[in-house]
Image (cartoon, rainbow, N blue to C red):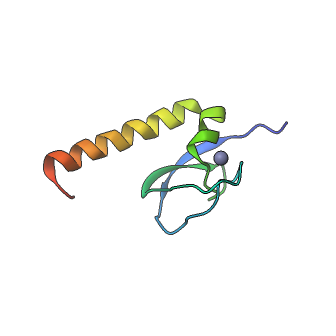
Amino acid sequence: MKKVVLVVKDNNCASNDPCALCGKRTDPSCGPELFLEGTWSLVCHECGEKHAPGLVRLLDLARNAEEYYLAQWGTH
Ligand SMILES: [Zn+2]
């Protein structure tokens, strides 16, 4: 099996593509998201858990931090 390499890139908000690995609908948000390395193919967090759990945790942290920021100081 080919090794799947995932990277975190800044999503430009334009795409709402299915997951490149399982084909399920993704629910992408603006800001950092998971992509297949070398492509702009979105990968859902379920697949991310399988191949790069550390990156998924990182994204969760980033999202929580953003929510906290918005709750404290409103929109940016
Ligand atoms: Zn998937």
Question: Left or right of 3: which side holds 12?
Answer: left
Is 68 left, or right, of 53 in this rendering?
A: left
Q: Residue furthest front?
A: 24
Judging depth in this view, the residue of 9 and 59 nearest the camera is 59
Farthest residue in the left direction? 73
Q: Residue at x 62, y 59 (%)?
A: 40
Q: Residue at x 42, y 58 (%)?
A: 30
Which residue appears at 61% of the width and 55% of the height? 42
| Number of disc labels | 0
Residue located farthest toward the bottom when viewing the structure as drawn: 14
Between 6 and 47, the one lying in front of the other is: 47
- Residue 36 lies, in percent from the top left, at 66, 49
User: Is 35 drawn above or below residue 60 in the view shown?
Assistant: below
**Residue 66 location (% of width, % of height):** 30, 46
Left or right of 48 in this view: 13: left
Residue 37 drawn above or below residue 39: above
* Residue 37, percent from left and from top: 65, 48
In this rendering, is residue 17 above or below 4?
below
> Toward which corner of the image does residue 29 lie, by quadrant?
bottom left
Name the image quarter holding the N terminus: top right
Q: Position of residue 27 (x, y in %)?
A: 51, 55
Q: Residue at x 56, y 64 (%)?
A: 16
